[in-house]
Amino acid sequence: MILVNTDFISGKKLETISIVKGSTIQSKHVGKDILSGLKTLVGGELGAYREMMDEARAIATKRMVEEAEKLGADGVINIRYATSAIMQGAAEVIVYGTAVKFIG
């Protein structure tokens, strides 16, 4: 499965199949949430939240790819990510793109 954020795949002719997406909502353990809150007092990277968002993006991407595979896609173009806070310490990540099949 080829994944790109462009509207083409070099050297390939494409047939559009459908929009595909994947999403997840992730939260951190309350203990890590408290420690991260304390970290905001002194500044610096909030490692627990970075890890949470990296994991959320990976899960959402995997779900999008699974949806594309079910449609018989060879790739997904125009991939975009979006995030939103659901509640304190929890975030939704959604990824979407256009599933395509190679032709010719």
Image: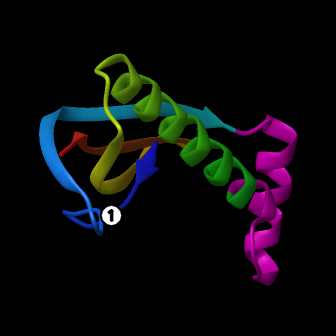
Snapshot colouring: rainbow
Query: Badge 1 is on which residue?
Result: 5
Which residue is found at the position 31% from the left and 32% from the top?
A: 73
Q: Quadrant of residue 11?
A: bottom left
Q: Nearer the viewer, residue 97 or 37?
A: 97
Q: Nearer the viewer, residue 76 or 84?
A: 76
Q: Quadrant of residue 67?
A: top left
Q: Please say if 20 is above or below 57.
A: above
- Is the residue marked by circle 1 packed among few (<14), some (14-19), or many (20+) residues within 10 Å? some
Which residue is found at the position 42% from the left and 53% from the top?
A: 3
Residue 90 horizontal side relative to residue 86, left or right: right
Q: Find out whether residue 81 is within the magenta segment.
A: no
Q: Find out whether residue 42 is within the magenta segment.
A: yes
Residue type at mark 1? Answer: Asn
Q: Which residues are magenta?
A: 28-49
Residue 91 horizontal side relative to residue 72, left or right: right
From the top left corner, tell me how far across and down residue 6 is, in percent: 26, 67
From the top left corner, tell me how far across and down residue 18 is, in percent: 15, 32
Which residue is found at the position 86% from the left and 56% from the top?
A: 35
Number of disc labels:
1
For the stretch drawn in magenta, what is the main secondary structure? helix
Q: Please say if 69 is above or below 95.
A: above
Q: Nearer the viewer, residue 18 or 83?
A: 18
Which residue is found at the position 49% from the left and 41% from the top?
A: 61
